Image (cartoon, helix red, strand yellow):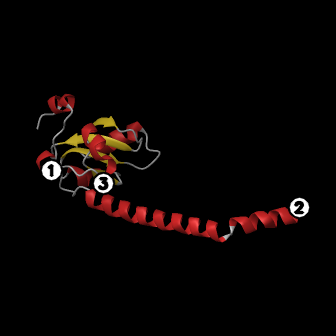
Amino acid sequence: MMRDGQAVRRRLLSTPNRIAVGLLAVVLVFWLAVMALALGSARLPSQERGLVAAVFPPGWSTDRAFRAVAAADGILIRRSLMTTVWVARSETPGFVGRLEQAGAWAVFRPLDRIDFLAGGCFYLTPPSRRGKSLDPGLANAFPR
């Protein structure tokens, strides 16, 4: 019985497996660094207003997110596919800063559906389209 366990351990610690685990670790560290830089540069400044995607802590209820957005002088528009991310809107300057004070971890510009299809998480909205929505329902419901 002991020999079988030792044989498995030797196979797991063999040189090819160590190389694969090392390579996986390098890729994971690189990906985390790129994502940290991308998310850090995508955060909105605290004086921003308009349509935003607010990231709230996991476990927050709809009611708690609603109260946080209302405390920041905004309205909830919808929840994203991620249960911790809510799209909200306010035309009062400083909306982003107030959302963060109310408990949001971070606030970003929401991606339009077409933006996401065009480039996924790495899509950069051209300056000419920033703050504009391709969703006619949202554009008509909340004119600028």
Q: Is residue 4 visible?
A: yes
- In front of the other: 28 or 16: 16
Q: CA distance from mark 1 to mark 3?
A: 14 Å
Q: Secondary structure at mark 2?
A: loop
**Residue 100: numbered disc:** 3
Which numbered disc, 2 or 1, marks the residue closer to the eye?
A: 2
Residue 93, percent across and down?
15, 50
Q: 27 above or below 135?
A: below
Residue at the image point whose x is 31% and y is 60% from the top: 38
Q: Residue furthest right?
A: 1
**Residue 1: numbered disc:** 2
Residue at the image point whose x is 15% and y is 41% from the top: 132
Q: CA distance from mark 3 to mark 2?
A: 57 Å
Which numbered disc, 3 or 2, marks the residue closer to the eye?
A: 2
Q: Amino acid at mark 2?
A: Met
Q: Secondary structure at mark 3?
A: helix
| Neighbourhood count class around disc 3 (C-alpha, 10 Å): few under 14, some 14–19, many 20 upward | some
Among the two numbered marks 1 and 3 on one chain, the one whose residue lies closer to the N terminus? 1
Q: CA distance from mark 2 to mark 1?
A: 69 Å
Among the two numbered marks 2 and 1 on one chain, the one whose residue lies closer to the N terminus? 2
Which image quadrant is residue 20 in?
bottom right
Disc 1 vs disc 3: Cβ atoms closer than 8 Å? no
Q: Residue furthest bottom?
A: 15
